[in-house]
Image (spheres, rainbow, N blue to C red):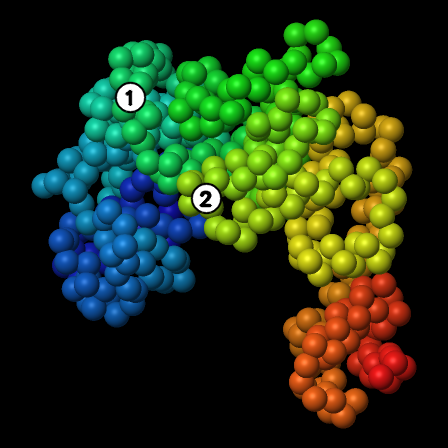
Amino acid sequence: MRNYLDVLKKIEETGAKAWLVGDTVRMMEMGIQPEVITLAIDSDDMYSVAMALGTGSVDARGAYPALRGEILGADFRAFSVRGSSIEDDLACRDLSIEAIAIRSDAGVVDPFGGRFDIRNKVIRLTGDNVDLIYDDPLRILRILRFAAELEMDVFWKTSSDVRAFLDAYPDRMNNIPAERWGREILKGIQRRPYRFIRMCEGYSIIPFFLKELEELRYVPDGKKAGRTLYDHVLNILRVIEERLDTNKIMQSDEFVLAGLLGRIGCKTLDGSDRGKQHDRLITDYMTRWNIPSDTINEVVAIINSYKEYYKPISEQTFCRNVLEFSQEGTMIALQFARCVAMAEGFFEEYREVLDNNHWNLKQVIRRFNNVASQTEGSTRYLTGREVMNLLNMKPGRKVGELLEGLDMAVGTGKVSSRAAAEQWLKAQPA
């Protein structure tokens, strides 16, 4: 904590009082090292604080301007105190576990019992103030997100207040902008997707943000009495969640979004009824949630391609996939196929094929990475201009075709150096 207190004291040398607040204090209380220090500063002029510190810049894009920078080797973000005191500021925060502050003398300001709630692993509205939900109903999803991610329970009164609000004001939930839903959903499924969706299910709020997922609860899987496509989605999210902490490739938005959205709109277990309308449905949701277009494309590609990996895939095909979807995108699709097989109970049947495909893909990726190691980070041994000079060619489509052919030669192991690349090019028909 000493370094954090030194940061506070450094800021207070400018004449502005400062406190550690929010996720920083909560993580410290839980024994977790914060990557970024969150501060509250008793100043309405962040620009003057930045000038006095001689570091940082003010980001005014959000609802509350933030000063971001680095002090004593620590990254920080600082917000102005809301209200006339730190206690007023803490009262504006939605959860008690986030409504704790630490002063520069190491004193703790905890007017709402946040440390007690952390020890007892409960999520509670700050001050049991139900008006926080009325002011912003999306706080309900935030409550469930924190409960899922931190593996805590929702405090009984908070739970009761949430259910009463949902019963009385469903129209308020329907009026939440889609992009705001998207931000919280993405945060909710990043670490504990299965637990998060189950918590949303427990409060019957899934229809507010993904009604097609709710509809899967009434679509039988056609294999076992009482099982629905919704059960299969939950099984996939459960397997993903179990492997998230041990497999870095799965720690991506694309992976969990594919698990959440892969079956929406379908009526059959094998997805034989999938078509372009399903891709549009998935794309429309992610677009409304303000998901980046590159991520949207990769999610759709994973959903459409993962079944291919239940049969042997050649290095040449993997090479094409890597060039089209990227190394990570192709590996995610293969790992997604593995998770689906585990969730659906047919993993042992395809274990050998999946393992062999994984080996082949790793070889292709290793060869492409060797290019970067030999060329100081370049993705190719030769540039287009170098190809034209070598073959005395003019710019045109043929140059692009040769570069693509060279990429395939690298990925399949036929070319492993610049000299070999030049020889390969000279051997191509004019």
Binning the other alpha carbons within 10 Å of mark 1 as few (below 14), some (14 to 19) or many (20 upward) gives few
Horizontal side, residue 252 vs residue 123: left or right: right
Contact, mark 1 vs mark 2 (Cβ under 8 Å): no
Above or below, comparing residue 63 to residue 340 in the picture:
below
Task: Write down the residue under mark 2.
Answer: 287
Is residue 192 in sight in this rendering? yes
247 or 412: nearer the eye? 412
Above or below, comparing residue 241 to residue 165 in the picture:
below
Is residue 126 in sight in this rendering? no
Above or below, comparing residue 275 to residue 224 in the picture:
below
Above or below, comparing residue 98 to residue 11 in the picture:
above
Q: Residue at x 84, y 58 (%)?
A: 316
Horizontal side, residue 151 vs residue 6: left or right: right
* Residue 11 drawn at (x, y percent): 23, 58
N-terminal of the pair, mark 1 or mark 2, is 1
Q: Quadrant of residue 409?
A: bottom right
* Residue 425 drawn at (x, y percent): 83, 81
Task: Write down the residue under mark 1.
Answer: 171
21 or 278: nearer the eye? 278
